[in-house]
Amino acid sequence: MNMAMKVARRINPLVDPRDKRLPRIAGPCGVVIFGVTGDLSRKKLMPAIYDLANRGLLPPGFALVGFARRDWADENFTELVHGAVREHARTPFREDVWRQLSEGIRFVPGSFEDDAAFDELAEVVAQLDQERGTGGNHAFYLAIPPAMFPVVLKQLARTGLAEQTADQWRRVVIEKPFGHDLRSAQELNEIVNDVFPEESVYRIDHYLGKETVQNILALRFANQLYEPIWNSHYVDHVQITMAEDIGVAGRAGYYDGIGAARDVIQNHLIQLLALTAMEEPLSFSPESLRGEKIKVLSATEPVGPFDETTARGQYLGGWQGGTKVPGVFEEGGLRPGSTTETFAAITLEVDNRRWAGVPFFLRTGKRLGRRVTEIAVIFKRAPHLPFEATMTEELGQNALVIRIQPDEGVTIRFGSKVPGTTMEVRGVTMDFRYGSAFTESSPEAYERLLLDVLRGEPSLFPVNAEVELSWEILDPVLEYWTKHGKPEPYPAGTWGPQSADRMIAQAGRSWRRP
Amino acid sequence: MIIDLPSTTASAVNHALIDIRERGGAVAVGRVLNLVIVTDDSAQVEQSIEAANEASMEHPCRVLVVARGLKRAGTRLDAQIRVGGDAGASEVLVLRLYGPLADHGDSVVVPLLLADCPVVTWWPGVSPAAPAIDPLGQLAQRRITDAAAAAQPIKALESRRTAYTPGDTDLAWSRLTPWRALLAAALDLPPYEDVDAVTVTGAADNPSTDLLAGWLRARLEVPVRRRTSPPGGGIHAAVLERRSGPVELVRPDGKVGTLRQPGQPDRQVPLRRRPVRECLAEELRRLDPDEIYYAALQAMTEVEGRRTGATKGSRSADARRGP
């Protein structure tokens, strides 16, 4: 016991799994952002970097490099970051934290085709290793449209920026869309994997960084209460909804031709389905988790015939939440005549013993009733009711609802006797919420994900196989849609087109009002 | 909303709570723990409530403040209920105890605890010599003291060591977390050499400095020396000697630290003293015994150059402000 503990690689004597309060700071490293002027960078990335610094989770000497086609010096970029942090950071602004952070901010001007600019970038990165001690560890964040990935990746390869050694890592971070169908996703993966090996690729699906999403696993696997009924014996069906109240005007150029299914269902909703339906992983290691997700996604298929089991729509102008809003064509969100959908609903089934016969309804849309994301597990009605029919007229099905945003929490719906002399049973809800203020202190998804990139923790990032499997699930529906019919209009502020109601009604169910 | 219930009983307070809940909708949902704060009836009451309210943003809880007033007065319980905006994300019950009742705070607290939720007791000021034996400490699975708030911080820390019971913790320990994290991160980097010796420097009456020395002794099992820096700066420096040169974390001004390692540029790092609310939020994050804290306490006795006696003067402003 009295022998001096050895400091060896990966065995750090100061670290102990029982020491739960010790935060793990990322090792020396820097981040290079491509596309610094976009919304994502200013509203999410830069504030997240500051918040991490403020929480003491970034390494001393952290470096942030911006690359863009702007005639800027370091100071201009620093100013941009400063503004973004002041406006959007979650934690209070502290001068001392900002000063340390800003000392490591650099800017390289140039276009993506410009060899000289990338040579300069390589130099700046090498300098940072000297001046700031970033140790040759760098993450490249591609906050740019995927069409530009090939040229940037080629440049990173040419300048040696993508080269890793045993002592220094290089990672690449990419955002959705990961292609627009299976083929393009495979092509994109090839392009990326040409330069960075799969274990160095971090695909951001910011939903997976949310506390409540991670809580699905805790709810399911840390409790005895739910797992016994989490199967087709007790579950009638599952509804996964992501509704947005905003239109597409802000992202018009991007959205046209993509649509709601590719934008949301392929990534966020299918990931939520995987977490809801997967079997218990052996452990929470990245391999086991991914293994289970891949298994359940391989068993998932769209249910046909698609003219009955799917629905899509485009919003019209109307009144939403007390404001008059324009329709998608009026606000220039889509080109005239475009058949891109702003609402999409599909029916999936999971072909395994646990879920046989349980439909999973996924829906998403713009300009719907309100902004909400939730997973609703609807249970079968009790097989026998010792009550007379008049007593249970108002009794709905039991439901467990996991609210993901806003107002994170869990709701259980069950029957209860209405006070009074007659026996009347009615559905009531029991609500657990993390407290409205709780979200203030719970980190933003981007903070968590960015820190995981810097620490090399891949659990919360979907891999190649997951991306391709989700396309395999969605592609048949998309193909059917291109060949048959067109989106049905729905007034803004409602819950989508009538075909969505018809679709679920022909399955003998109805949508929950979230 | 603030409701005063002068000269009352615990069951009347309970009634009032249920009443508020019925009239105002479900006010008391989703609380995750009970936080009992034990103080004197002084300015400390409000300071502690403020810290607890801010910590409640992360841990929605029921806060029960046991404020002990004059013992010579007649037996009397004055209660105050705060909910909504006046209580952060928690509900606060301020219980002022007078006369003989002042020694029996547990009798008032027991009927007011939320069912099934864990109980944490926090003494922001003077704490009992053995927190686990104190009646209000016995209610709790976690007991938070603050050695730095004692008149003689180092002596108080000594008594934490001798009276340690699983579930005890001290804010002098949570103030230390950023230092520990940085030192641990420094050893994650090459060269992966053994640490041969350690020196920790800090103000004489700063208990966190002693705990840091104890922690390093416990983890590294090499000679650790504690040195004294001028009062007012909290922890000043930690130096880990290695063959290729020392790893040094130095904070001369109490705000910004410098991390020095051979073959690496000096790195600056914000390392300000942590406010109480931050330490409290950290303490509430885990409710199981902190074995690492225990090991650090025990290993303090093996630290060279450590003074365990009383330091001169009364309560030191420096100790109060943490590491």
Image (cartoon, coloured by chain):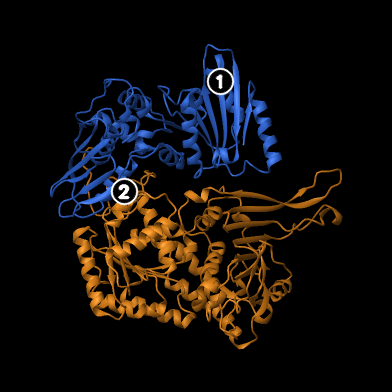
Chain colours: A orange, B blue
Residue depicted at 72% across the width and 58% down the height: A397
Query: Horizontal and vertical percent for residue B140?
Result: 50, 31
Q: In the image, A224: left or right of A288?
A: right
Q: Nearer the viewer, residue B288 or A33?
A: A33
CA–CA distance between discs 2 and 1? 43 Å
Q: Quadrant of the C terminus of chain B?
A: top left
Residue depicted at 27% across the width and 64% down the height: A74
Which numbered tag is attached to residue B97? Answer: 1
Asked whether disc 2 touches disc 1, contact meaning CB atoms under 8 Å apart, the reply is: no
Which numbered tag is attached to residue A96? Answer: 2
Mark 2 secondary-structure assignment: helix
Query: Horizontal and vertical percent for residue A283?
Result: 45, 57
Taking the view exactly as shown, the residue that stands out farthest to the bottom is A483
Q: Quadrant of the N terminus of chain B?
A: top right
Which marked residue is nearer to the observer: mark 2 or mark 1?
Answer: 2
Which numbered tag is attached to residue B280? Answer: none
Relative to B240, residue B267 above or below: below
Q: Can the viewer see residue A456?
A: no
Query: Horizontal and vertical percent for residue B44?
Result: 46, 27
Q: Chain of mark 2?
A: A
Residue depicted at 40% across the width and 39% down the height: B279
The residue type indicated by label 1 comes to Leu
Q: Can the viewer see residue A327?
A: yes
**Quadrant of the image occupied by residue A358:** bottom right
Relative to B153, residue B30 above or below: below
Q: Nearer the viewer, residue A439 or A348?
A: A439
